[in-house]
Amino acid sequence: EQRVYRFRCVEAWSMVIPWDGFQLNKLIAKAKPTSKAKYVMFSTFKDEKTALGFKAYPNYDWPYTEGLRMDEAMHDLTFLATGIYGKPIPHQNGAPIRLVVPWKYGYKSIKSIVRIDFTDKQPKTLWNTAGPDEYGFYSNVNPEVDHPRWSQARERAIGTGGFVERVPTLKFNGYEKEVAHLYKGMDLRKFF
């Protein structure tokens, strides 16, 4: 199926993107994880012969890993993309398959997934490990919680032409009605 989602980068730019793929919860249902599974961990490939970038960034803890709580992973908006703009997804956009979580910053939408694990512990993620004060585990789009080096209150919409004014960032990237209940009672400044 095709989903058209807003996509928000942590670096304060955004786009609207048509993705082809399927809901992650359909794959999880087929996998039948046990009740002990509280989180889902995603891992990318690590092939230093094919992807030379691994050597260019030796300080990162490769492979790239990301994680979601089980309720986030099971949400109907959480999507596995195999295509973009009506064509098979190319390598630079995450082939063969990538995660799309439209209410979170783009780095949570891990590319080139080769492994999915269920765990009872919050998984380590590449960006949260590399910069825990800058990249939280949850990484929900939130205009009220700035990145330490820039504001998240406004964003530049790519594809709207030249020098357009930045537009206000919407909480949960505009999906607040659909997902805010997942974080009810949480301090979103502490659990960013």
Image (cartoon, rainbow, N blue to C red):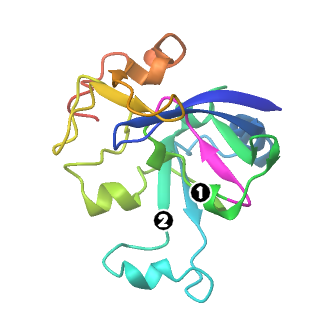
Q: Nearer the viewer, residue 105 or 184?
A: 105
Depicted 36 relative to depicted 75: above or below: below
Instruction: Please state if 117 lies on the left or on the right of 132 as rendered.
Output: right
Mark 2: few/some/many CA within 10 Å (<14, 14-19, 20+): many
Instruction: Please state if 66 lies on the left or on the right of 20 as rendered.
Output: left
| Residue topped by disc 1 | 111
- Residue lying at 81% horizontally and 41% vertically, measured from the top left: 86
Mark 1: few/some/many CA within 10 Å (<14, 14-19, 20+): many
Part of the protein shown in magenta: 95-104
- Please report whichever mark, 1 or 2, sits nearer to the chain's N-terminal start: 2
Residue 24, quarter of picture: top right
Q: Amino acid at mark 1?
A: Lys
Where residue 189 appears, as percent x and y from the top left, is 21, 29
| Residue topped by disc 2 | 64
Where residue 152 appears, as percent x and y from the top left, is 27, 31
Closer to the observer: label 1 or label 2? 1
